[in-house]
Amino acid sequence: MIESNKLNVAIVNYGVGNLFSVKHACNSVGMQASITFDKQEILSADAVILPGVGAFGNAIESLEKLDLVYVLKDIATSSKPFVGICLGMHLLMDESEEFGGHQGLGIIKGSVIRLDNPVSISGKRLKVPHVGWSRIYKKSDSIGDLWTHSVLEGLANGEFMYFVHSFYVKLDDPEMTLSTSEYGNIELCSSFQYRNIFACQFHPERSGLQGLKIYSKMASFIKEQSKEH
């Protein structure tokens, strides 16, 4: 049972991802997280997290079978905080080129493309998938500090986060980008913010204390939002 004095966060369970590590991270900063595919539970939550590790096509198929596509689109057009992590970030896009191409949720204008032959400064070809720690950077051409009043507020520019991916998002509107990261010669969007939606390529729940700071800031924003409704 969810405690009335705690924030109710629904972690969408569609059979893909490290759900329990996300739940543990939420609970460790005072949120009450539930792993669920129940439509009403997701719609009534104070915030929704769409995690994921795996194949794009399988994930979309699973969301369709669970009849969750329209639910997630409803959340996206509300004022409710909505978070996409790794594959969850990808699913928000219009399309993905993974395994021949698939249509995404179409919540964010953009596509998912492969890490194509990344090369290090020394000219060495890097392995795909990218697995390990990489830095996240503020956009160098932004006016002001985009991280202020975002879940990245308080983190150092160039902070390390943990990544596991073979694909990354290419936004139609790069102004949504909150942070960029590099894998060899490839610069990629590692997080973005659009209205009530925050999404990241990295896994904050697997990024140690700095990652937990993101969940803590997330909890603060969700609490503020819940007071307004």
Image (tube, helix red, strand yellow):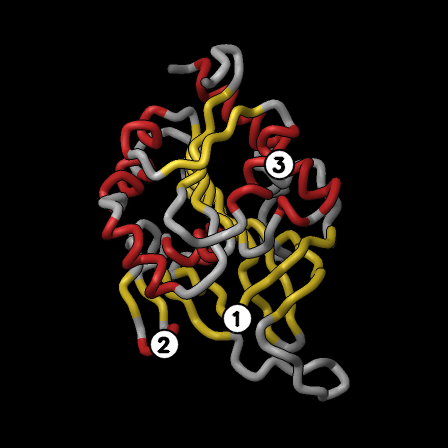
Residue 20 appearing in the image: yes
**Would you identify the image quadrant in which residue 184 lies?**
bottom right
Which residue appears at 39% of the width and 73% of the height?
Answer: 98
Residue at disc 1, secondary structure = loop
Res 214 label: none
The residue nearer to you, when weighing 167 against 136, is: 167
| Residue at disc 2, secondary structure | helix
What residue lies at 46% left-to-right and 29% top-to-bottom?
9
Residue 166 is tagged as: 1
70 horizontally vs 206: left or right? left
Q: Tag 1 or tag 3, which sits nearer the N-term?
A: 3
Query: Which one is nearer the viewer's eye here, 43 or 171?
Result: 43
Q: Is residue 90 above or below residue 151?
A: below
- Determine the residue positioned at 39% across, 36% down: 36
Drawn side of residue 215 relative to residue 67, left or right: right
User: Considering only order in the chain, which callout, 2 or 1, is on the residue closer to the N terminus?
Assistant: 2
